[in-house]
Amino acid sequence: MLGSIERYAFIDVSNTSGTANDILNFKIDWKSLFGHLTGEKWQCKKVFYYRGRKPGKRVRKDFKKIKDIGYEVRTKDTFIYPDKFTNHAFKCEGCGRECILRLKKLGLWKSNCDVELSVDATELAGKNKEFLLFTGDGDFSYLIENVINKGVHIFIVSNTGRGRDGNRSFSTRLRSIVEREEQGLKRVTFVDINDWRNKIGKEKKPPTSVTASEPR
C-alpha cells in the first residue's frame, strides 16, 4: 500500500456498466479493470463487485469468471416487476366513435445491492482509508457523507455526460457533494471513467447490417 493508506473499490455494476455502454459507448473489460485497481497506480486491497443475479446457467458462469479474476462478489436474486396495462381513449377519425387502446408495458428485472455496498463500505471506513466508489447514483450520497466524516477520502468514478435519451447517470446530489468538497475540505474527488477507457475498456462492435433480399 501507499504508506499507511488502505484503498478499497466498490463497484455498482449496473450503474457503471450503463454509464460505459449508454453514454461512452464502450464495454468494461472486468479483468483489465481489476488489474488497474490492484496494480501499482491504485493498489486496492479489495475490489467489491455488486450486481443482481438472474436465474440461468450462463449467469452462474459469468459470476464464476468474475470471482476467478479476484473480485469480492456481492449479489442477490433479481425479481421482475409485473407487466403494466394502461388504457388510452381516442376518437376514430373514420367513424367518429370513441375507442379504447389498451397498451402493455413489460415488467423490468430489478435487483438492488445498495444496502450490501453501504454496509461493506461503512464497516471498512476509518482514518487512513481511501475508497473508489463506482457509481453515479444519488442514493449513495448519505453513505459518502457518513464515511468521509469517519476520515475516508472518496474517489467517485463515473461520467457526467448524457445518454442517447438525454438523461445523465451522474446525479445532481453527487455533483453537489463533489463541488462542495472541491471548494472546501477536499475529501471527495471525481474521477471520469472515460479517462480510463484505454486501460479498462473494449470498444463495442457496431451492429451487423442485414441486406434484405428481393422477393422471388
Image (cartoon, rainbow, N blue to C red):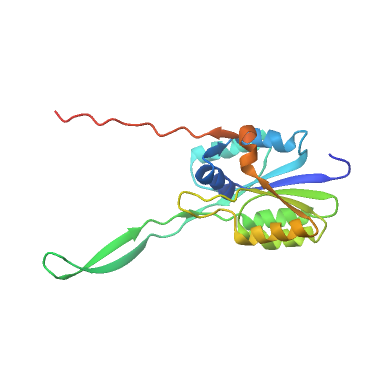
Residue at the extreme left = 95
- Identify whether 178 is placed above or below 194: below
Q: Residue at x 56, y 33 (%)?
A: 202
Q: Residue furthest front?
A: 183
Q: Nearer the viewer, residue 140 or 104?
A: 140
From the top left corner, tell me how far across and down residue 80 is, in percent.
Answer: 46, 56
| Residue drawn where x is 29% and y is 67% of the image | 87
Residue 181 on image: x %, y %: 75, 58
**Residue 42: percent from left, percent from top:** 76, 39
Residue 64 lies, with reference to residue 139, above or below; the image says: above
Q: Is residue 34 above or below residue 170?
A: above
In the rendering, at what x and y percent does residue 56 appear? 48, 42
One can see residue 68 in this view? no
- How many numbered markers are drawn? 0
Quarter of the picture containing the N terminus is top right
Report if residue 146 is visible in the image: yes
Quadrant (top left, top right, bottom left, bottom right) of the C terminus: top left
Position of 132 relative to 115 (above/below): above
Left or right, 98 with reference to 170: left
196 with respect to 169 (left or right): right
Q: 127 left or right of 114?
A: right
Q: Residue at x 18, y 29 (%)?
A: 214
Quarter holding residue 9: top right
Give the quarter of the image for residue 98: bottom left
